[in-house]
Image (cartoon, rainbow, N blue to C red):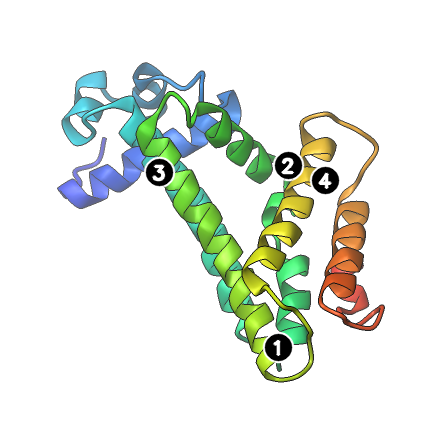
Amino acid sequence: MPRMTPAERREAIIEAALRVMVGKGMAATTVRDVAHDMGTSSGLIHHYFESMDDLLAAAFDRAAGRDLDATRTTMTRGAGPVEQLSIFFATYVRAEQDWAFQLWLDAWAEAARRPAVRETSQRLNVAWQQLLAETIRAGVEHGVMACGDPEAAAWCILSLLDGLALQAVAHRLPLDRRVVITWSVAYAEAELSLPSGSLGCDARQ
């Protein structure tokens, strides 16, 4: 391997673990797999991560955190809460990309056995919910949405999105991304007392 600083090497290990996870799944990923991907020894991996749980959590955090940051950044470009909510749906990668949602499925499945993965998936899932709740609260404050409990509404919308994506990705039912987003958008509009079509056609493509 090219000479790296300790920080660079740790980052390289995380990226290698993520590549293996996407290809083999979280449960099947081993230290040996990651070392092979990097062309190095298993001992090097153990030097930077005390357990496989910690490494898998770090790799999942990297992928899911990037997606969350990208959506949050894009939403700031919206002119107001309604447009920002439309952007949320249009950029919600767990419903858009099979591999991204599969990582979440793997993390949820492994959470019971891997404390670090559980903590990471819980933290990131709450962050997605809070992004929604903050947008809904802003909509209520601006008088463009009506909602008595933004926290609960955010959980309901997120759960519907993920539940439909689960059917499409894990169960391979005939639900494509357009259907997942369209149904979720329609529910959000009804839940938040928004006129039909308020969230825009872009979120339904």
Name the quadrant containing residue 11.
Answer: top left
Looking at the image, which residue is at 76% across and 70% down? 193
Alpha carbon separation for disc pair 2 and 1: 33 Å
Q: Tell whether label 4 touches label 1 (CB within 8 Å).
A: no
**In front of the other: 180 or 62:** 180
- Label 1: which residue? 140
Alpha carbon separation for disc pair 4 and 3: 24 Å
Counting residues from the N terminus, which is met first, the one under dot 2 or under dot 4?
2
Image quadrant occupied by the N terminus: top left
Q: Tell whether label 3 touches label 2 (CB within 8 Å).
A: no
Looking at the image, which residue is at 66% across and 83% down? 143
Dot 4 falls on a residue whose secondary structure is helix
- Label 3: which residue? 119
Counting residues from the N terminus, which is met first, the one under dot 1 or under dot 4?
1
Counting residues from the N terminus, which is met first, the one under dot 1 or under dot 3?
3
- Label 4: which residue? 164
Kind of residue at badge 2 = Asp
Kind of residue at badge 3 = Glu
Alpha carbon separation for disc pair 1 and 3: 31 Å
Kind of residue at badge 4 = Leu
The residue mark sitting in front, 2 or 3, is 3
Counting residues from the N terminus, which is met first, the one under dot 2 or under dot 3?
2
Alpha carbon separation for disc pair 2 and 4: 12 Å
